[in-house]
Structures are given as C-alpha cells and as structure tokens.
Image: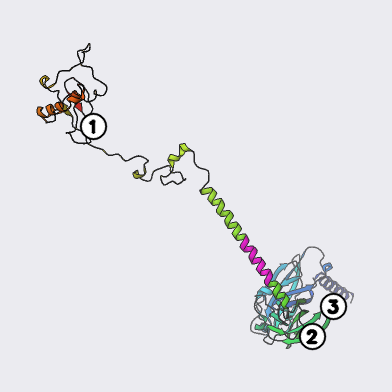
Amino acid sequence: MSAAFYVCFLLWCFQTNTAGAQLPPPHNLNVISMNTNYTLIWDWDQGSAESGAVNFTTHYVAKFMLRSKKKSPNWNTGCETTSHRSCDLTNKNLFYLGIYVFRVRASVNGTDSDWAMKDFCPDEEAALGPPSKVALSPEGRNLDIVISDPLSSTNRSMREHHEDLYFQIRYWERSADGQALRGHSLSSKKRVVTLSNLQAWTSYCVRVQSRYDFYNKSSSFTPPLCTQTEGTVPWWEIVLYFLLSLVICFLVVLLFIYGFFRCFKKLKATFYPSVQLPTPFQYLCDSSGSDIPRLLPESDSELLCDKVTVCPAPPLLEIHSPPPEFLPEPTGLEPDSSGKHSRSSSGSGDSGMYSTGGGSSNLRQQHSGQDSQGPLDSEQVKMQDMAPGLKTHLLAADEGIVDMCV
C-alpha cells in the first residue's frame, strides 16, 4: 500500500513540473482594421519566460478549409519569429467577403506554446474609413461640397465592397467669434452635394462621415472645413476693379515703352557709336561712308585706288636737223665758247627740223612766214602739222637726233 502511494506521488509531481515548464499561449487576440488594412495584435505575459528572448509566429487560413476532413489545412505564414506583439496582414490580399482564422504562438529557447486562435471577417468586422478628401466651392449663395470616397489599401474606392455606401453631412453657420450658430444635417450618396439658399457673405463649416447600414458601420467625421459664400457684387466694387485694372495696364505699357527705348539706346550706342574713328584708321572703313571698320576687302573691286588705263609703249620718232643750206644765217648773235649759238629761254624747247614727211618746201614756207618774229623764232619748229594731243620733248637741242615720246 505504501509503495503504490509513493508511485502515485511521483507521477503527480512529474505532471506538475511539466505543466509549470510549459509556455502560456498569447491571449486577447484582436484585429485592428480600417477599410482593407488589417493588423493582428495580442498580449503576452513577459514574466512567463524564465530566460531568453520570446518570438511569435502568426499563421492564417480560410475557415472553410478547416471544415474539410479529407486533408489537413495548409496554413499560410503571416509573420515568422517576430519579437513584436503585432502582425500586419494587409499585403496578404485577404478576400473582403471571406472568413479567416488567425493563430499565434510564442517560442522561448526552442520551447513553443500552444496556438491562440481568432476568427475574422473583413466585411463584417473591418471598420469603415472617412472620406479621403472633402473640398468646398462657393457658387454665389450656394455651396458645393465635393466628396471623395474612402480608399482601400490599393487606392481603390470602397464602393467596390459596399455598394450602398453614403455620406452623412453636417454643416453650420459660423459667427464672427468662431461659434456655431445653427447646425444642419443631410445624407447623400452623391459625391457632389450642393447646399442652396444660404446667406450671402457668410462663413459655413462642413464635416462629412461615411456610412454603411448593412452592418451598421459609420466612420469618424472629417475635420471641419470652413469657407465663405458669395453674393451680388456692389457696383462701386465693379467700378473700383475696373479703374485698378486700367491703372495697372497703363503702368505695364509705360514700363514696356521705357524699357524698349533704354534697350534701343544701348544697342545704338554699342553698334553705332557717335565717336568717329581717328584719321589713320578711316582707310579701314567702307567707301560707302559707314563707320563700321572693314579689315578685309570683300572683292578686288573694293580696293581703294584710282582707275588705271594701260596703254602700249609709244613709238620713237627720229628727228633730223635740216641741211645747212636751208638754215638762214644767224644775225646779231655771237658764238659762245663752245661754238654753239645762244638761245633764249623761250626757244630752247623747240629747235631743229622734224623729219615728218613735210619736205623742204614746207620748211621754207614756215621759215619765210616767221621772218617777222626774229632770228630766234626761225629756228623753232611748230608741231601744227602733227596729230593733236602729242606731247614732244626735245632731248637734244642742236645735236643730230632728237627723240620724242608720244
């Protein structure tokens, strides 16, 4: 009897030690969800771990797969050995109308706890978010409210999941000190809602909420957005705006003209300076009178030079002196030391007879016609019988041959 009691006591102690050494599973599992964003969170007693760091593993699976008796379900891993007490399942593409089972367990030094499970249906349990954007646009005494649908994690409208989604709108008139005077409320499925018959030149504030009545979902309200309505513009404001626009246009045109003339003067002073070039540099300019220097000629025709006509070399004419019998005796002249006759300065250029084919008879006639001019004139030979325009140069006065250039 004592031996049996002793064996039972040992078995009881062994079971107690084994149970005490087992890790407790996580508890208080919950899903924080907004539209299609899902995050699983849980609690765990840190004092349960004797030593070492604790890690958590999260799995998920569609619930209908657990009901199949033919094969065991294939659990998908959401988070593997993470030290955080949460797991983001947004990027797992969970079907919005499906039902899923989440499970979590703790691990310390190779020891695993039991699985803690949680069922989750996004369509029923996921919270509905507020409108993604609200804008106000005053139109006279009316106020247009432009509302954007709440968006999913893939930036798509939540109307794809909730076709009966609508908006709850609250608006009120705001006084000068910022206090709300009267509040109003309306519901609409439209994305553009017009508040009509409001007071002109009055400030109004608006807040919008998303709603889905099938599962009684309602989002939080958006922050208040305020604006002022408009009304008929007084005539004095129209006249004032018109005068201001005229003054502004006049100033703009005046500044434009002033800037244009300033630029024109600068350009003219740069490219057409009033200071003339010095005389030594004027040969670089064009012959047309421009002040712009021209360093290289454009063509040979623009060279600064006079026209030159090239003529062939003139033939040389030989002039022979007449025989002595045709020359009259000089009277009143004294021979000089060299045996030559002295001639006056007026007759030194034209002396001698030219062999131009006139003959001795012509020479006699010329000599007889010139006797009245003195003895010096008789020695000069006039070139009247020669072609006009010929210029003669006597190279030798009384010595044999005289050359003439034409």
Dot 2: element:
strand
Q: Is residue 109 magenta?
A: no
Residue ID for mark 2: 184
Front disc: 1 or 2: 1
Quarter of the image that includes the N terminus: bottom right
Residue ID for mark 3: 179
**In this view, which residue lies farthest toward the front?**
372
User: Going by the image, does 367 lie left or right of 120?
Assistant: left
Q: Is residue 247 magenta?
A: yes
Q: Which amino acid is tagged 1?
A: Lys
Q: Which amino acid is tagged 3?
A: Gln
Magenta-highlighted residues = 242-254
Q: Is residue 25 visible?
A: no
Compared with 194, 371 (above or below) is: above
Front residue of 268 and 392:
392
Residue drawn 83% across and 76% down? 176
Q: CA distance from mark 1 to mark 2?
A: 127 Å
Front residue of 68 and 318:
318
The picture places residue 386, in percent across and down from the top left corner, at 17, 34
> In which quarter of the view is residue 361 placed?
top left
Q: Which amino acid is tagged 2?
A: His
**In this view, which residue lies farthest toward the top?**
337
Front residue of 381 and 124:
381
Residue ID for mark 1: 391
The picture places residue 126, in percent across and down from the top left corner, at 73, 80
Q: Earlier in the sequence, mark 3 or mark 2?
A: 3
